[in-house]
Structures are given as C-alpha cells and as structure tokens.
Amino acid sequence: MANLTNKVAVVTGASKGIGASIAKHLAAAGASVVVNYASSKEGADNVVAEIVKAGGKAVAVGGSVAKEDEVINLFAKAKEAYGKLDILINNAGVFAFSPIDQFSADDYRRQYDTNVLGVFLATKHAIPLFPETGGSIVNISSVVSTLAPPFGSVYSSTKGALDTITKSLAKELGPRKIRVNAINPGMVETEGAIGLGIIGSDMEKQTIATTPLGRTGQPEDIALPTVFLASDDARWITGETIFVSGGAGI
C-alpha cells in the first residue's frame, strides 16, 4: 500500500459511498483526514470513528462545496486541525437522470453548483495550504463524461467539464508541484445509486452486460487507485483521466 505518513488530506463528500471509502483508505495509508460532509453529520462522524478505531487520525467538518463561505470554513478548520494540506480529493457530487422534456433550471444549477463550481471553490481555497513541495489533487469524475448515456445530459456534461478542468489545472499547477488527475468510475454500488433505484434495475443489468469484468463496482474499487494517485508512487502522473470501471466505456 502507498505510504501517506505525515500527509494531510481533505475528502469532500466523505460521509458515505465512494468518499467514505476513500477517506478510510487514505487514513489506513497513514494520512490525517478531514472528512467533509454537506448534510450527514452522523455519517461523517461514523467514518471518523471507524478511522480512529483503526488507529488513524480524522476530523469531520461540515460544509457544502457549492457555497464559498462554507468552503472557506472547511479549509480553515483543516488548517486549524493539521496545519497544512497535501492531498485534496474532490469527491462531492450529485447526479440525476431524466429526459430532456423534464429538464429544469433548478436541477441544472444543483448539479453544476456541486459538481463543477464546487471543484473550483475547493481547489481555490485548498491551494494556499499546500507546502512548497506540492501535493496531489484527485477529482472524482465518471465514465459518463465520454459515454454520455441517454437521460443523463446534464450529469454527463458536468463530468465532461471536470475532465477538462483536470487537464487545465494540471498545466496551471504543475509549476507548483501539485499534480491533478481524475478517476472516472463506472457504475458503483453506493447509497445514492441504491436510493435512486439504479442498483437492481434494468439499467444496472445492461451496464454489467457491457462491462468486461462483469459486475458493478464497489466503493473500495475506486478508493484504492485514488490512494495511489494521492501518493508519491504516482509522482510522474498528472493531467490524466483514468477509467476505473471494470472496462466499461473502453
């Protein structure tokens, strides 16, 4: 496993699902972790408790990445707790699938404010905490950025934007020794996917049928390569969007 001893990480949207798994795996690798949440304090506290029970270090900090004042507070609390930042995982995200005739400006804003604006705000306010030795930013994107499934035009476009942002920021932040990469998951069994009825649906069955490795992903499948990209083992990798999808979308 990658060695993240003495590293500090902020994981946005880490109270459940992929974010929670990433936070736990970063802590297991030695990082001190700030577990961010937008609404589920209980979920974030449970993640922290699990990390601490396993011998790691973590604190929970609330705040929506779509609101700049709350993002500012998130990184102020991170600095207060650990003094610096080496790793930022832009994981917070929302998604919805619906036909274009049901499009609403409110849903557009909800998805773009979290999935795109949230990445800009978190990155902007994280950068001052990175040391001169640099660090790593990992954006959690999605295979929908290129697969562009029907009924997912808004969500897919947010992730397409995130892939472009990743490449642009890699060039901008490279001189500061900050690497920027994206992980693009396929379908993953999370609380969100279960809540929307995707898990167990015809959509899941169709996805599995076109996935070479023949199953739905689990949060750990995304967390492990994220930890690699966060670590010095990936020191010569930046500007990449890496599909972690069991082969879906290749």
Image (tube, rainbow, N blue to C red):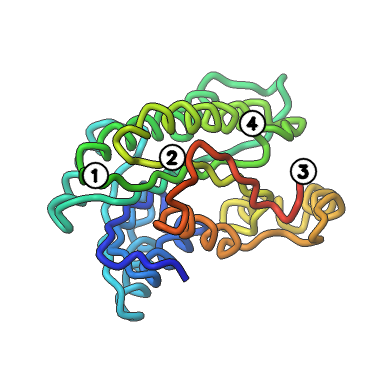
Q: Residues within 10 Å of mark 4 (few under 14, many from 20)?
A: many
Which mark is drawn over residue 156?
Answer: 4
SS of the residue at dot 1? loop
Horizontal and vertical percent position of residue 64: 34, 40
Which mark is drawn over residue 180?
Answer: 2
Give the number of callouts.
Answer: 4
Which mark is drawn over residue 242?
Answer: none
- Could you tell me the amino acid type at mark 3? Ile
Q: Residues within 10 Å of mark 2 (few under 14, many from 20)?
A: many
Can you tell which of label 1 and label 4 is closer to the viewer?
A: 1
Q: Which residue is mark 3?
A: 250
Up the image or down, 134 lies above or below 221; here it is: above
Viewer-proximal residue among 250 and 37:
250
Residue shown at 46% from the left, 26% from the top:
168
Viewer-proximal residue among 242 and 143:
242
Labels 2 and 4 touching (C-beta < 8 A): no
- Could you tell me the amino acid type at mark 2? Val
- Could you tell me the amino acid type at mark 1? Phe
Q: Is 187 displayed left or right of 123 in the figure?
A: right
User: Which badge, 4 or 3, is on the more N-terminal residue?
Assistant: 4
Horizontal and vertical percent position of residue 2: 44, 66
SS of the residue at dot 2? strand
Residue shown at 30% from the left, 60% from the top:
33
User: Which badge, 2 or 3, is on the more N-terminal residue?
Assistant: 2
Labels 2 and 3 touching (C-beta < 8 A): no
Which mark is drawn over residue 130?
Answer: 1
Residue shown at 35% from the left, 41% from the top:
178
SS of the residue at dot 3? loop
Q: Spatial distance from mark 4 to mark 3, Cα to Cα?
A: 16 Å
User: Which badge, 1 or 3, is on the more N-terminal residue?
Assistant: 1
- Could you tell me the amino acid type at mark 4? Ser
